[in-house]
Image: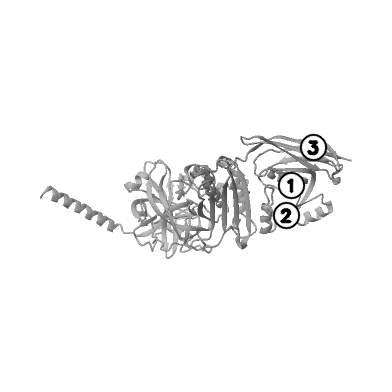
Amino acid sequence: MSLFSTTRLLAATVALSALLVRAASTQPAGDTSISLDELKPGQRGEVWTVFRGTEPEPFSVEVTGVIRNALGPGKSLIVCELTDERVQKMGAVAGMSGSPLYIDGKLAGALSYQIQRFETVRYAGFTPAADLAEVREKVGPPAAAVKLTQFLPAPPSSVPPSSSLQPASFHSAGASPLLPAFTLSGLSPAVADLFAPRFAALGLAATALGGSTQSGSPVTAGASASAPPVLQPGSAVAVSLATGDITLAGTGTVSRVDGNRITAFGHPMLSLGEVALPMCASEIVTILPSTMSSVKMANTGAIIGTISQDRLSAVSGTLGPGPAMTQVEVTVAPVGSAPRTLHFSVARQPQLTPVIVAAGVTQAIMGANDAGLANGFRLRGNITFPAAQMLATQTLYAGPQGFAQGLNEFVQGLAANLQNPYEKTYPERVAFTVEPLTVNPTVVIEQFQLSRASARAGDTVQVTLAWRDFQGASQREIIDLAIQPAWTGKRLEVVLAPGRALDELSGRPRLISASELRSFGAYLAAIGDHRPNDGLCLALVESAELFSDQTVATPETPGSIERIARASDETRFRTRSAMIPLWERHVLPGKLTATAVRRPLRIVE
């Protein structure tokens, strides 16, 4: 026999062997499960997952034993050695979460926990099949429902405790949940790095090494893919928090399929309980092996259903329509070029939504090639709630760096605007427009002076205000302040300060307590009632005691009325010291400065 014939025969034999191995590795139906009591050390099994693309493949494991009550009373963990050479090198991989384990053709559990790190022999923990079934049988909210009642809105000035969102972890035994492979696409590396601490504080260890196959087309309630992929145990699946031009999703693996009901991950995503999050198709690009923590790289695909449960043992949902989401648009109109708009949809979750929306706004401002924002810009926002209720905002920034420096404040304000503790409602649409400025708005106040320190009724006190523009010449304005008879005998002050500072001086709290208001309409009115945030406010003020009802303040209220009101509702009515503006003017509109000064003025007879 010739060498050529021998080579052909050998190639055919190898190909036939490969076919036989593949045929022998046909995925079990998984209609039945095996109990923990039936598991014995040394039993061999197969775990199905996607290594690349969308087709699941098996890898071999050997049962080591069962750790009883490992995750709590009645919540055990199956421990297996990863005997497959491919997986033994990389260990349990983030993104394999939920990969089903079959023993003797029966579903035993789902890959879910990493055992130690840097171990010389690789092991993994598996959530038992009975715990997966427990989550599957829970009834979730309708696809378009918004679940808000289980959350107390976090004060805008604070970051929600990470423990409220992070999955539970079994660190005492050296095991930790195989977190879904959270991937972030649509953000430049600089913006992704800027938001990494904020996502981490919410339990999202997101990496920018991921993509999305979907455009920024708006997602409406009930939307789903026209031809959704066929999911089977071992298929890759993603749970998205944002889709479109900005995508944030956690990719894991399907554990079991029961009709249109999908159970996945084998552990919680963020421990949110009942949710309404988009279930998306996912394509695995490759696996990045690491001795510490290997991870799958994935592309997030179209919405194919709704995840309704995020529990200790798994996430679960149904194939079909997706949930209601908030549509976000961020439009930038650079000088001399066509406008560009980011379109993305965000899941309605009180603690996550503001951060994701802020990331999209930051990307539009800092993550493009346009340089037209260097002189500064005006950011206008319109937040539309159901029943056509709208909240409009606008803020001036001295360029992208000024925006980055004030990012915490922007996120806090956005959180206050998007959340409300009064109705089960959430914004339907959030639209931002970035308007470039031709001149840097920053100014430096050089002089603030009164023509006299005391005056009588009928006199005119002149207020001299001088400032210097950014890299410009000095300018001056003289403002006449006519003294009114009603001010006679009072010790007053002339205040020059930003609108927010005067709001606080005049008794408007920076943070509005939910207990102070009684309706969603009153809440929108309260957060929209503030002085301009550009320029400065010039005001003549006096000290007084303010008595407030739902943030509406009345000065010097009789004590009898105050006592009666506070006895009926202690949280609604409040008394505080404040400055009452007797006269006020907005100066330097369209400019930015942090100057705040006060000058005494006495009105004599």
Q: Residues within 10 Å of mark 3 (few under 14, many from 20)?
A: some
Q: For mark 2, what is the residue?
A: 550
Q: For mark 3, what is the residue?
A: 600
Comparing 451 with 213, the one in front is: 451
Mark 2 or mark 1: name the one nearer the start of the chain: 1
Left or right: residue 188 versus residue 504 is left
Helix, strand or loop at mark 3: strand
Identify residue type, mark 1.
Gly
Q: Check the picture and name the quadrant holding the C terminus.
A: top right
Q: For mark 1, what is the residue?
A: 507
In this rendering, the label closer to the viewer, 3 or 2: 3
Left or right: residue 571 versus residue 369 is right
Residue 343 drawn at (x, y percent): 50, 54
Helix, strand or loop at mark 2: loop
Identify residue type, mark 3.
Pro
Comparing 600 with 312, the one in front is: 600
Residue 402 drawn at (x, y percent): 58, 40
Residue 186 drawn at (x, y percent): 47, 49
Query: Of the numbered discs in the image, which one, if any, rests on residue 7?
Result: none
